[in-house]
Image (cartoon, rainbow, N blue to C red):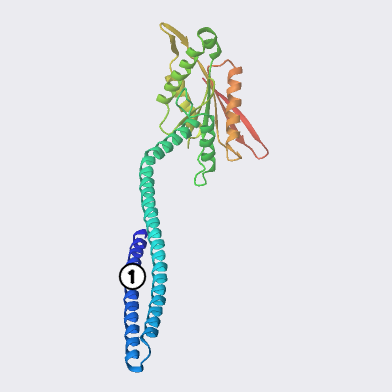
Amino acid sequence: MPTNKINAGNSSSTNLRRSSLVTLALTMVMMVGLIAVCLGSFFLSGVPARDLIAAAIGSAIVSSLVLWLNLRARGQWLRALSHDAKLLAQMAGRRSGLHLRTELYTEELKPLSKLVQEERQKLIILGLTDPLCDVGNRRALEQWLRRLFDRPQTKAPVSILLIDLDYFKDINDRYGHDIGDQVIKNFAVELKDRVRERDLIARMGGDEFCIVFPQTRLTMAMSLAGRLRTQLPLTMEVTEGVFHTLGWTGGLSVTDPFDMNYKQVLKRADRALLNAKHQGRNRTKIYELIATANENQSHETVLH
């Protein structure tokens, strides 16, 4: 677009020069014609030559003045047009340079934009991941359970197992919190190695974990919890050559058709966990609802 404007300015300048030359030629022709008329009138009418020459000179002066004014005006117009053409050329150059720099900056920013997106995704993942154990955190657990409850296409039961390490405070008091953190981390590794691929593990906080068994009835969940009881190590090395007895207490529950949200099944699993602790720890207790015509009654089973 700017190039077309510059070409148009150059064309207009050429036309002005041509027009000025044509005007000059016509003026010269008029002056010659006027002198010829004066001379002809002198010979034919006998008008004194002095008067005719004076008239011719006056006409020439007037014509020259008109021509000079015309050329001056056209010259000013031409200079203004040339100035505008230069400005347009400068603007076109600046715009072209700006466009080029914009493209370069855009290309340079593409890797940065990708990096920002990757870092944002990492932050999202970190926001749902426990940094110590590399499992889900409580927020992730709530999102998982909410999605499982909100699925309209299935009403399959979801079983939940809450796990709490027995006497974990003794480890922190005796060996320090760094050793305690390492025990929690190692225990999480053992859990991940022994659950099914579709099962979900989250750290509730401290030494408490939660395992979600999707589409799993209570009987199957009881079997999975019992397998964990037999497969998880009984002791764990806390320092070189020093082993600590690793006991854990569990509370197991399953969703019920009468549940309004996921918090109810979590509450039942937590109640079962507390009852298991009161009965001596190192055991898993199941909290099961039995629906009756009048009310919901609880049925508790101990799974050693």
- 126 to 75, vertically: above or below: above
| Depth order, front residue of 98/179 | 98
* x and y percentages locating residue 211 in the rendered image: 49, 28
- 226 to 245, vertically: above or below: below
What is the residue that sits farthest to the right in this orientation?
294
Q: Residue at point 34% right, 81% down?
A: 30
| Depth order, front residue of 75/229 | 75
- 129 to 62, vertically: above or below: above
What is the residue that sits farthest to the top in this orientation?
241
The residue under label 1 is 15
* x and y percentages locating residue 76 in the rendered image: 41, 64
Split into 4 quadrants, where in the image is the N terminus? bottom left
User: Would you call the spot at circle 1 few (<14 residues within 10 Å), some (14-19), or many (20 or more)?
Assistant: few
At label 1, the amino acid type is Asn
Secondary structure beneath dot 1 equals helix
* x and y percentages locating residue 269 in the rendered image: 57, 28
What is the residue that sits farthest to the bottom in this orientation?
45
